[in-house]
Image: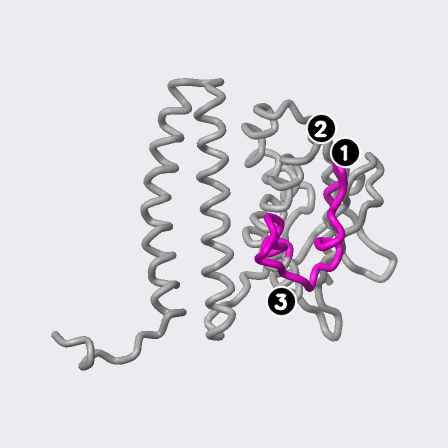
Amino acid sequence: MQLSSLSTPDFSAILASSIHDMKISLSTIRDLISQLSHSNAGNAQLMQLEFEANRMNNSLMQLLALYRIEIENFSLQIDEHSSLEILKDIEAQQSSLLALNDINLELENSDDFSCYCDADLIGNAISSILNNAQRYSQHKIILSAGKTTDGFTYFSIEDDGPGFPDILLNTKMINFNTGNTGLGLYFVAIMANLHHNGDKYGYITTNNDSRLGGGKFTLYLP
């Protein structure tokens, strides 16, 4: 077949198909790592490998979701969920990495309440931010949930690291010329904004006002 006879490829569709294939392969790798981890409990290298595989999987999920949003083939699975259960699920997902990094994760949710959201999507989004927080945190991270006076549900991550660099304090900016592109924050901002109730839309904020002296990320849902 001559190249001249082929139609011009849709790169975005090729990329989406490649991401799907990579996710299948990565899923197999994660299953194998999980099996090895059970028979080699406490192996730091396996724990690190599991973390990196999960981080790659989250990145691929984010890219695929952004592509589906672009082609208008993405929908949320909104349902009623317990805010405390969302926090506990995130804690369970992060338990191995927290132990590996010797970081204490403190949950704050004084009054369990219902949250209407796509729990899997929001949980994965918060987990990806928590992964990054652990890279810079020294000893402790606070993961909290609550209600604002204007009716938003919020999920916050506060750490005791050096804080967000200036470029990540503007959550609308993505810079591929630095190590900190802001792509993860951008993805979470998009996912938050897809949640809406009337004229209220979800959003995120980043600042360096953590009670622990580092960075603070907050996701707001209407």
Q: Nearer the viewer, residue 157 or 206?
A: 206
Question: Within the image, what quadrant is residue 49 found in?
Answer: top left
Marker disc for residue 138? 2
Q: Is residue 206 above or below residue 110?
A: below
Mark 3 or mark 2: name the one nearer the start of the chain.
2
Q: Could you tell me how far apart the alpha carbons at marks 1 and 2 are, in whole angstroms?
A: 6 Å
Where does the C terminus fall, quadrant-wise?
bottom right
Q: Are marks 1 and 2 in contact (CB under 8 Å)?
A: yes
Tag 2: Cα neighbours inside 10 Å, few (<14), some, or many (≥20)?
A: some
Tag 3: Cα neighbours inside 10 Å, few (<14), some, or many (≥20)?
A: some
91 relative position to 32: left or right = right
The amino acid pointed to by label 2 is: Gln
Identified at 70% across, 51% down, the residue is: 114
Identified at 78% across, 48% down, the residue is: 146
Marker disc for residue 194? 3
Q: Secondary structure at mark 3?
A: helix
Q: Could you tell me how far apart the alpha carbons at marks 3 and 2 are, in whole angstroms?
A: 33 Å
Q: Nearer the viewer, mark 1 or mark 3?
A: 1
Question: What residue is disc 1 on?
Answer: 160
Q: Which residues are magenta?
A: 156-185
Identified at 41% across, 22% down, the residue is: 38
Tag 1: Cα neighbours inside 10 Å, few (<14), some, or many (≥20)?
A: many
Q: Position of residue 148 (x, y in %)?
A: 83, 55
